[in-house]
Image (cartoon, rainbow, N blue to C red):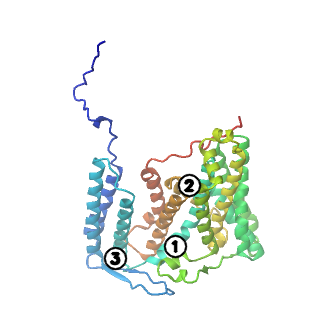
Amino acid sequence: MSTSTQTPAPGTRLDGAALRSPIDWKYPIVYGVLALLTLVFMGLLGGSSGKSTTFSFAAGTDLFSIPPLTVASQPTVIAAGIVLVAMAAIATWLATKRESPGIWFPVVFGVLFLAAFLTWAGADTGRIPITPLLAGALALSVPLIFGAMCGLVGERSGIINIAIEGQLLAGAFLAAVVASALKNPYAGLVAAPIAGAVVAVILTFFAIRYWVDQIIIGVVLNVLVVGFTNFMFSTVLTQNPEMWNARQQLPVLPIPLLGDIPVLGPVLFRQSILVYLMYIVVAVLYVALFHSKWGLRTRAIGEHPKAADTVGIPVNRNRVINTLIAGGIAGLGGAFFTVGSGLAFGKEMSAGQGFIALAAMILGKWNPVGAVFAALLFGFARNLGNTLSTMGTPVPSDLLLMLPYIVTIFAVAGFVGTVRAPAANGKAYAKQ
C-alpha cells in the first residue's frame, strides 16, 4: 500500500496564517479620526487659548456640596487629545494582532473624548452644568427605554414590532385625554398602557392570525395612529382643550436621602413615578427573561418555535400575550410626552422616538441592560445638543439638532458589531 503526499502550492504558508480572519480596521479608524479631531481641531486650532471651562456639580439640595472644577480649556483638550492618539495607536496595534482591547477601552475612550468636547464647547460660555445635563439625558431616555423594552419582548418572542412609534404616540394621546378629563395625571398614566396594548391587538391579529408581513403591518399601524390622533386633535382636542387637552403633570417624588446624594441623587432619585416604573420594568424584564420559566419559553418561541411546540409550549398564544405586554410597556413610554412632561398633546409629538428605540434595542443586542445603555446614549446625545445650543457654543446649531440621529446611524451601522436577532424573528408559525 502506497501513500502519496501533496506538495503545497508556491507561497502557501503552513502555519495557519492563511486561515486567520481579516483585520478589522473599523474601530482603529474611528478612534484615530476622533483622536485627531480632538488634538488638532479642538485643541490646537480650537480657538480656546487663554480661556477656561468650569464644570458645576451642585444641585442646591445636596447632602454636601461638590465645588466647581475649573480647567484651562486649551491645555486640557490638548492633553486629552494626546491620550486619545495614544489609545488609537494601541487599538491599531491590537487590531493587527487580531486582539480585542475589551469593553473598558471604548468606554474610557468615549468618556475622555466627551470630556474634551465639553471642555472645548464650554470655553466661550465658561460653565458646563453636569447635573442638569445628566438629568435631562435621563428624562429624554425614558420613552426610548420603554420603547426598547417593548421591541425586545416582541422580538424575543418572534414578532417584529415596527409599530413602537405608533404605540408611543397612542399612549401619549390617551394619557393626555384621560388625565385632562379626570383632572388627574395618574389616571392618564393608567390609561397609557391600554392604548399601546390596543395597537398591539391589531398587530397580533394580522401578524399571527393572517400571517401578514410584520414589517408592513407595523408601518401601516404607525400611519393609522398618526392619522387618527391628528384627526382627533384637529376636531375634538382643539375645540375643547380645557376638557380634553389641559396640561396635567405627574409630581416629582424624591426618595429621602438618596435624592440628596450629589450629582446622582437629583438625576436618579428625584423623579416622577413614571421614571421609577421604568427602573422596575427594566429590572423585572432582565430577571424574568433570563431567570424564569416565562423567559425560557419566550426565548424558545423566538428561536425555535417548532421545538417549543413539540414540548407543549403554545407558540402563538404566548406570542399574543407577550406582544400585548410589550404594547403596554410602549404605552407607558408614550405617557412621558404628556403627563410625564406636563405638556398637552400635540400632533406627532413622538417625533420618531419609536424608531430610535428600535435602534437602541439592536445596539443593546436584544438584552435589557444593553438596550438601556444604548437608549441613555441617544438621550444624552439629544440633551447635549439642546444644552449646547442654548449656551451659544461654536458648534453649528444644525449639527447639534442632528447629533442624536448621527449617533443613531453610526451606532447601528458601525458599532453594533456581530449581532444576531432571534432565529424565528418575523416568521409566522402554523401549528404542526
Q: Nearer the viewer, mark 3 or mark 2?
A: 2
Residue 103 spot, x, y in % from top left = 39, 58
The amino acid on which the numbered mark 1 sits, given as a three-letter code, is Gly
- The label shown at residue 384 is none
**Tag 2: residue type?**
Leu
| Dot 3: element | loop
**For numbered disc 2, what is the local secondary structure?**
helix
The x and y percentages for residue 55 are: 39, 79
User: Mark 2 or mark 3, which is nearer the start of the sequence?
Assistant: 3
Q: Which residue is mark 1?
A: 136
Q: Are marks 1 and 2 in contact (CB under 8 Å)?
A: no
Expressed as whole percent of the image width and height from the top left, the position of residue 154 reads 63, 51
Q: Residue furthest front?
A: 1
Looking at this rendering, what residue extends furthest in the top direction?
1
For mark 2, does the 10 Å Cα neighbourhood hold few (<14), some (14 to 19), or many (20 or more) residues?
many
The residue that mark 3 highlights is 123
Left or right of residue 432: residue 395: left
Along the line of sight, the residue nearer the viewer: 330 or 355: 330
Q: Nearer the viewer, residue 1 or 160?
A: 1
> 10 Å neighbourhood of mark 1: few (<14), some, or many (≥20)?
some
Cβ–Cβ under 8 Å for marks 3 and 1: no
In the rendered structure, which amino acid carries the disc numbered 3? Ala
Q: Earlier in the sequence, mark 1 or mark 2?
A: 1
> Cα distance, mark 3 to mark 2?
36 Å
Label 2: which residue?
Answer: 358
